[in-house]
Image: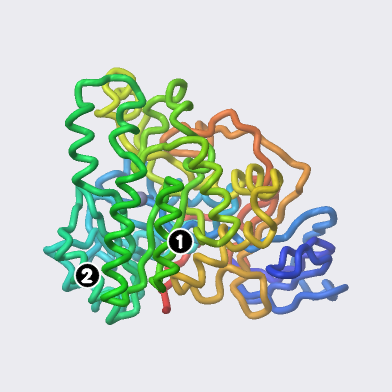
Amino acid sequence: MTIDLIIKNGMIAMEGEGMVNADLAIEGGRITAMGANLNGKSAEKVIDATGMQVLPGAIDPHSHTNDPGYLNREDFAHAGRAALLGGVTTYIEMPLVKDIDDETSLKERINDGNKSALTDFSVYAGFIREKNYGAVKGLSKMGAMAFKIFTCRPFQASDDTIYKIEEETAATNSIATFHAEDETIINLMTNRLASRRDQIAVHEARPPEGEASAIHRVGIYSRLTHSPIHIAHLSSEMGAQTIRELKRLKVDITSETCPHYLIFTRKDVEKLGPYIKMSPSLKSSNDVDALWAALDDGTVEMVATDHAPGTRAEKEIGWEDPWKAWGGVPGLATMFPLLYTYGFIKGRLSLNSLLKVSSSNAASRFGLRGKGKLTVGNSADVIIIDPKYERKVEGADLYKAGYSPFDGMMLKGWPKYVIRRGELVVEDWELIAKPGSGRYIKMER
Ligand SMILES: [Zn+2]
């Protein structure tokens, strides 16, 4: 339930202005006033945020949380708890196995979410390929204005189809989002490395050149089709360089990287093995540095979790045969604390960059109106952080899958309070909201 609320004496993080000491008032789910000494007498609740930082709720533009085929791994309610405890108030739900490619499947996903989500959510359509690209027009009218396409297996669309999909997304001003890795390169490398059982082989099979090649192709197509495009889970310096080149060629391209590509390298694979298997693969420490730099200089606009947990058993099997391990990691709870601790505190992200890559850029690119910034009139999605508080990552508590690849890391940036659309949903680092309080948010571009 939304309440009238005043946050007093906090340091409010504002793009372009830094941290501003002010109060913030919330009524009917929206921010109604910001300024010095707002009168809190009429509010139902006053939060004293002295010494604390007040930021917009984080937005994760890419999460897999409710594929009906995979409810043993994740669901809206568990994912929503993890998200809110980590400061994510909105995420964009992406399919995993069950396609969202017609009115019925989209409505089903929206209904599932409205029944049990804790965060606000939008819905990606996909996976789009030969058989279903005719659905783009209808789905974009229903608010799914972003479409996921693979340039490689297991959901590969042919180059011919990719071109035609981009024509459809251009016509509706929707976004064509790519899992961009070159199938020819992956296939060739995988066959050559197939007899190896060490943990690094699965990463070597997906080199940065494969990423650069696929990004280049879909980007150059976009020069002709004029489709807005987005690169999912960017993992390499070469990929970022290719994006810079496409931007110079005036391609309407944005991208996201993920916390795992900002923290881990192939060296970590020896210890964590299948628990950090995902695709695209992990790269080198040079790539890690280059991705932080690309986030801070605006080449890469946002960070996404690509939250896709497998069960422990599906990971454990990989110690014997890494090719068989589930590829994908949980990440909703740790995205913001990792960006805060390893980006903002370590000086790799300015405050402005932190605000953009964790929230406002995703809101503006994907048309999440009223989200992403603390401004009067906007949705009251707010996180309040005690900068001195730190806590160890405990995947056993955070996730249905029972582990996190970041288990044991000490992080700051866990919000003491979270307000989602005016409702206090986390208080003293504990979830107090009920499943079903999250709402579907249409993309409007
Ligand atoms: Zn994904």
Residue 404 can be seen, yes or no: no
Q: Is mark 2 within 8 Å of ligand 1?
A: no
For label 1, count other residues whose C-alpha is less than 10 Å away and answer few (under 14), some (14-19) or many (20+): some
Q: Residue at x 63, y 47 (%)?
A: 343
Residue type for callout 2: Ile
Q: Amino acid at mark 1?
A: Arg
How many other residues sit within 10 Å of disc 2, few (<14), some (14-19) or many (≥20)? Answer: many
Q: Where, quadrant-wise, is the C terminus in this rendering?
A: bottom left
Q: Identify residue for label 1.
A: 244
Q: Are marks 1 and 2 in contact (CB under 8 Å)?
A: no
- Secondary structure at badge 1 equals helix
The residue shown at (43%, 21%) is: 270
Camera sees residue 164: yes
Q: Which x, y percent locates residue 104?
A: 22, 68
Q: Nearer the viewer, residue 76 or 348?
A: 348
Given residues 117 and 174, the one toward you in this image is 174
Q: Which residue is most to the right?
A: 37
Q: Residue at x 32, y 32 (%)?
A: 204
Quadrant where the image shows the N terminus: bottom right
The tag on residue 165 is: 2
Residue 386 x, y percent position in the rendering: 76, 48
The kind of secondary structure element at disc 2 is helix
Between 345 and 84, the one nearer to me in the picture: 345
Q: Residue 187: where, in percent of width, then height?
A: 19, 39
Q: If you read the primary sequence from the N terminus, does the residue marked by circle 1 or circle 2 appear first?
A: 2
366 displayed left or right of 134? right
- CA distance separating discs 1 and 2: 23 Å
Residue at horizontal 20 percent and vertical 72 percent from the top: 135
230 displayed left or right of 420 = left
Rendered location of residue 369, percent (x, y): 51, 76
From what the image shows, is residue 309 above or below residue 316? below
